Amino acid sequence: MYKPLPNSLTITTSKVNGLGLFAKEGIAQGTNLGTSHIKINGDIIRTPLGGFINHANEANCVKVELKENQHKRWNLITIRNIKEGEELTLQYTFYKI
């Protein structure tokens, strides 16, 4: 069954911008949260992870590129322990801020 977000995350109001991704529980460093972006035929498509994660210069997550046949996808990985209630952030590379 498709789940747009892992059980450990929720979307709620962000102090950074609009809505953001927040931890519902502690998340360990190095956790793969799933696919945030997919590139198909030159177009980058955001999943709910990619669509709701906000930018931060000192982000707590990174995108890791994976190649699958003719497509590319990026998974969201935590780069440090995330506390319950903390917003997940990413340093944007696909979009200008």
Image: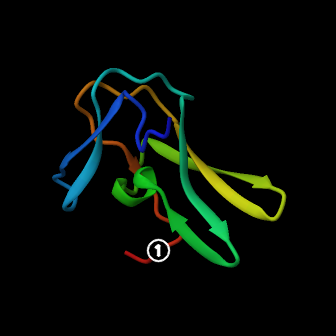
Residue 37 is situated, as x and y percent measured from the top left of the image, at 55, 59
**Above or below — where is 40 with respect to 53?**
below
Q: Which residue is mark 1?
A: 95
Query: At 47% across and 22% down in the image, what residue appears?
Result: 28
Residue 21: which quarter of the image?
A: top left
Q: Is residue 66 left or right of residue 89?
A: right
Residue 83 is situated, as x and y percent measured from the top left of the image, at 31, 25
Please tell me whether mark 1 sits on a helix, a strand or a loop: loop
Q: Amino acid at mark 1?
A: Tyr
* The residue positioned farthest toward the right in the image shown: 69
**Above or below — where is 12 with respect to 95?**
above
Residue in front for this viewpoint, 15 or 25:
25
Q: Quadrant of the C terminus?
A: bottom left
Query: At 75% across and 63% down in the image, what residue appears?
Result: 71
From this viewpoint, is residue 55 visible?
no
Residue 88 is situated, as x and y percent measured from the top left of the image, at 35, 43
Q: Is residue 95 left or right of residue 89?
A: right
Residue 7 is situated, as x and y percent measured from the top left of the image, at 37, 28
Query: At 27% across and 24% down in the image, what residue appears?
Result: 84
